[in-house]
Image: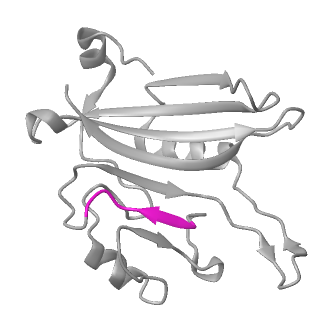
Amino acid sequence: MALPAPRALAQSISSAQPFVFAGLSLETTRAQLRQRYPQDYSSGNTLDIAPERAQDHIHQIEIATPDGSGRGRLLLSFERRALVSADGRVLRAAGYPRCAEIEKRLKALFGAPTRSDEFIEGDTDGYMNRILIWERLLPQQAPDQQVEQLNLQCGRSKGEKHFWALSIGVARSVR
């Protein structure tokens, strides 16, 4: 995805605090994840949350860095994985929240998206992607991290009426 020209970018984003969704941000540390989800946390930067403890539809969290320095990417995945029996029967299909529900929450928190993009994946029999993008200028950050971007990725299969929320990603880049 191409970013708008620098002047347009400066006009399209506002100065603000970093993005936070469900209490998670690029500054979230490994220690904070361990404290918040002690039953699910094992090690590393990725956490799979047990379905009974999932909050805000988040079933997997990948933090940017263990120290919360804000570099890298925060990824919040909404997929509730399928429940499969020992003999391979699907007891509960995988599921996702509706994109409109997550989009509504993000708009309430951060206003309208800066831009959006829709496209059909070429080799997926008509799978439609929708990516909503919010951007913020963070002048207090290091020069290589002054633009923070939050992407809500949604999708729907051919013939489906609703888009489903797949994930939220947050990252910083150069202004």
Q: How is the image coloured?
A: one colour
At a point 56% along the width and 32% down the height, the residue shown is 131
Q: Nearer the viewer, residue 82 or 95?
A: 82
At a point 44% along the width and 54% down the height, the residue shown is 75
Magenta stretch: includes residue 174: no
Measured as percent of width and height from the top left, residue 161 is found at 85, 36
Measured as percent of width and height from the top left, residue 26 is found at 29, 55
Residue sticking out furthest to the bottom: 39
At a point 41% along the width and 83% down the height, the residue shown is 42
In the image, the segment drawn in magenta is 59-65
Q: Which quadrant is home to the N terminus?
A: top left
- Check the image and report above or below for 84 versus 70: below
Q: Is residue 89 rendered to the left or right of residue 75?
A: right
Q: Is residue 96 rendered to the left or right of residue 171?
A: right
Total count of labels: 0
Q: Which quadrant is home to the C terminus?
A: top left
- Check the image and report above or below for 152 versus 125: below
- Check the image and report above or below for 139 versus 54: above
Quadrant of the rendered image containing residue 116? top right
Measured as percent of width and height from the top left, residue 174 is found at 20, 29
Measured as percent of width and height from the top left, residue 16 is found at 24, 40
- Check the image and report above or below for 86 versus 172: below
Quadrant of the rendered image containing residue 84? bottom right
At a point 69% along the width and 39% down the height, the residue shown is 155
Magenta stretch: includes residue 61: yes
